[in-house]
């Protein structure tokens, strides 16, 4: 049985479990639609951030590079509900930079998995350090979690903020402060 067949079978069982008829007109193709959606939403499971971060370009300076407001969508591994928001990334090059789109692609690699935000933040920072070898990296994620807004405590609009600091960002509070100031600018 293929992965797609397993998903279709699980969705049919789920629909029956909540009291639905998986053969009714509106649901008949739902197992197949969800199986295709899973390929897209969880596509990061088969990707390696190294394929995006390994192609670098030589630079003469070591000034901070910031990419902010990278939109991401992920799925909470505890409730299988979405969480989504913005990622903000900075790094201090050590003679090498990557194309800016590669930072967004790295966020996507890890966001497209069953995930928790705290882990996602650290995975992005660790990938930057592992593949780019910068002097330091800092990653901040701000996200709204559907497990808090549509169920449970039901607090829409609340955001969870996580931060991961690596290298010089762990030891130099001036760099960290500069990062936060740069996020404030429009």
Image: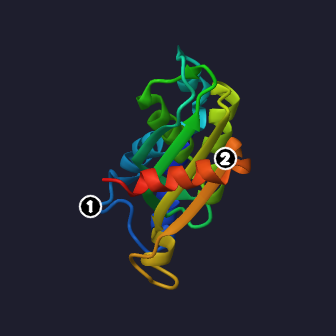
Name the residue nearer the viewer: 54 or 36.
54
* SS label for mark 2: helix
Q: Which residue is mark 2?
A: 169
Q: Which mark is residue 37?
A: none
Question: Would you say 165 lies left or right of 182 here?
Answer: right
Quadrant of the rendered image containing residue 132: top right
> What residue is at 64 percent from the left and 58 percent from the top?
118
Q: Is residue 31 above or below residue 80?
A: above
Name the residue nearer the viewer: 4 or 184.
184
Residue 100: % across, % down: 43, 30
> What residue is at 57 percent from the left and 37 percent from the top?
91
Disc 1 packing (10 Å; few <14; some 14–19; many ≥20): few
Mark 1 → mark 2, Cα distance in angstroms: 52 Å
* SS label for mark 1: loop
Residue lying furthest left? 25
Q: Is residue 11 visible?
A: yes
Marks 1 and 2, the one that precedes in the sequence: 1
Q: Which residue is mark 1?
A: 26
Disc 2 packing (10 Å; few <14; some 14–19; many ≥20): many
Q: Quadrant of the N terminus?
A: top right
Residue lying furthest top? 58
Quadrant of the rendered image containing residue 96: top right
Residue 4: % across, % down: 50, 40
């Amino acid at each position: 049985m293929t992965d797609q067949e397993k998903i279709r079978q699980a969705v049919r069982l789920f629909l029956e479990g909540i009291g639905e008829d998986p053969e009714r007109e509106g649901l008949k193709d739902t197992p197949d639609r969800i199986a295709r959606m899973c390929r897209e939403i969880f596509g990061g499971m088969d990707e390696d951030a190294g394929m995006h971060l390994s192609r670098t370009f030589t630079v003469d300076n070591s000034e901070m590079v910031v990419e902010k407001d990278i939109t991401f969508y992920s799925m909470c591994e505890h409730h299988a509900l979405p969480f989504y928001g913005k990622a903000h990334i900075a790094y201090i090059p050590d003679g090498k930079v990557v194309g800016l789109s590669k930072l967004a692609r790295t966020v996507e690699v890890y966001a497209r998995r069953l995930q928790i935000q705290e882990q996602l933040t650290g995975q992005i920072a660790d990938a930057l350090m592992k593949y780019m070898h910068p002097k330091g990296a800092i990653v901040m994620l701000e996200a709204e979690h559907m497990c808090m807004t549509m169920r449970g405590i039901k607090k829409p609009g609340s955001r969870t903020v996580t931060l991961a600091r690596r290298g010089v960002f762990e030891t130099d509070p001036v760099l960290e402060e500069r990062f936060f100031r740069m996020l404030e600018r429009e």
